[in-house]
Amino acid sequence: MAINIILIVMATAALVYGFDYVCREKRNGVIRQCMLANGILTFLWNFGYGMMGLCDDYTICYWWRGVALFGVCGYLLVEFLFVRHVTGTLKKHFAPIMVVLSILGTTNFLLVVQPSVVTFFPYAGRTAYSSNPVFARVYQACFLTLIIMILVSMAIYWWFRLSLRREKEIVILLFCSHFSLVFAMIPDTVLPTLGYVSIPTSGIGAFACYVFTVYVADRLSAFELSANSMNDYIYHNVDNSVLFFDTYGKLIMSNEFALKFFGLDENARPYFYELFQVSKEKAEPLLHSDTHAEGIKLTTTKSNTVCSVILSTIRDKYNEPMYTACFVYDLTKEERMYQEVNALKQQLQIDLEKKTRQMERLTLQSIATIANTIDAKDVYTKGHSERVAAYSVQIAEALGWHDNEIQQLRNAALLHDIGKIGVADAVLNKDSGLTDEEYEELKQHTVIGGEILKDINMIPDLDAGALYHHERYDGKGYPAGLSGEHIPLSARIIAVADSFDAMNTKRVYRDPLSKNEILAELKKNRGTQFDPKILDVFLELYEKDQLANA
């Protein structure tokens, strides 16, 4: 009788404590729900067994035992949820494990509440029971063992991943609570399955486990900063201005740093637009906007300090603004550094442009010198490279090229014959026909020129003119046998200019051709040796006497 009264008292205490806990403020949502659920389930567990022991009607005893077993199964499932939340284990597999445990728990409940499984009888002034079928005993033992093993495994896994002593203290409390539950369940749950008389101690173990669990929850909460301590920390220690404004933009609270930064008295209540250089009309939409993902730049009224201001509006359940949190960061140093960096950047840009122009002039002078050196190898072609460059530029201008592109083409044209440095003077200046061996040597000047210029990166595609200006549009040229659009455009332009200058100047083996002869030769090779579009542009310039130096 006494033990049954004790169980009912414990049940009532657990229920009251569970509702008291959930009504407390500043508690984690999941922990509050677990404490409330286990308070109710502990009540069912103890109250069911207590009333069963006091009841003489065995038919009603089945119902009270069913209530108690429902509390047992539910308690273990909620305890699994609580331990998982505290330890942070089984995150990926939580849902399927919870489903499996729920199915196993439901099956266990339905199995052990069957009238055929249990036998009631009077014993020492109370109603006791024993379980008979082997399969029911084995299933219940396996289910309870599985739950306890999972809980202990989760705690052990968490233990080895901890570094803080206060967290290990939580694990020790969890161990104590679950071992007290296991120890208390032996006389009540295990002995009846072996045919012995039940002793209703599991409810006492459940209550002890619940008290331990509540203590664990309290310890977890104790590790968190309270609202007052957080406010106190922000007020005294945060080295940036933190201010709160009401619906009308009036200051209602600020930290110590903000009072010094804005030069305010502790009781001062200025408006937002009085602290910053912003009109009253613009201040209201700033304070109540929900789109301040980044800080807005404002200047303070008193000190003219440039600040980054982050605003966050706190709204009520009707989505109407209540308060606005304002975080102010002094940008004076950043602004000064930005101005210094910007000034340095501008000066570096000026110096770079100056050096670039000097380099370009030096490069152009070097190219002109090299071109004159090349032309000097052939006494009959002095100025050839300059003229080819001039013709190429006029073609490019007629095609609508940009100045930068035209300059690059001019450089390539000036150096298109640089490979002749590697050709013997006797071959270049021979006044009779070349032998096959001499012609092959002469053709090598394109390859030599390409090799000389290929590593010069300052001028893009500088080697294309030297390497491909003897390619033909029909693919019968040299050195690569390229055709059509596969020949670089600059090389196709230089090819027309080079051929024209060759026909228009005196050579060692002939005099310059007449204008009609030149036109006839160019038109004859339209589409075979020369690009038709480029040749048409050139012919239009030449026939209208618009070609300079011709």
Image (cartoon, helix red, strand yellow):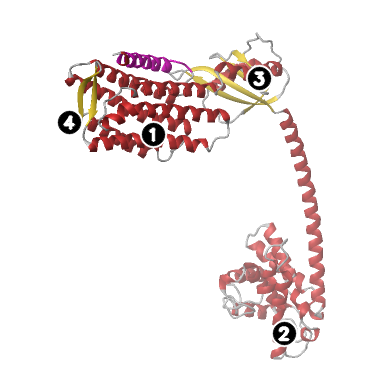
Asked if 265 appears above or below 283 in the picture, the reply is above
- Counting residues from the N terminus, which is met first, the one under dot 1 or under dot 3? 1
Residue 10 shown in magenta: yes
Query: Which residue was labeled with disc 1?
Result: 148
In the rendered image, residue 479, in percent from the top left (x then y), is placed at 64, 79
User: Is the residue under label 3 in contact with that under label 2 (CB below 8 Å)?
Assistant: no
Residue 543: image quadrant is bottom right
Amino acid tagged 2:
Glu
Query: Which residue was labeled with disc 2?
Result: 441
Residue range in magenta is: 4-25
Depth check: 183 or 443 in front? 183
- Counting residues from the N terminus, which is met first, the one under dot 1 or under dot 4? 4
| Residue 311 located left or right of residue 28 | right
Cα distance between the residues tagged 4 and 2? 112 Å
Q: Disc 3 or disc 4, which is closer to the eye?
A: 4
In the rendered image, residue 46, in percent from the top left (x then y), is placed at 32, 19
Amino acid tagged 1:
Ile
Amino acid tagged 4:
Ser
Query: Which residue was labeled with disc 3?
Result: 276
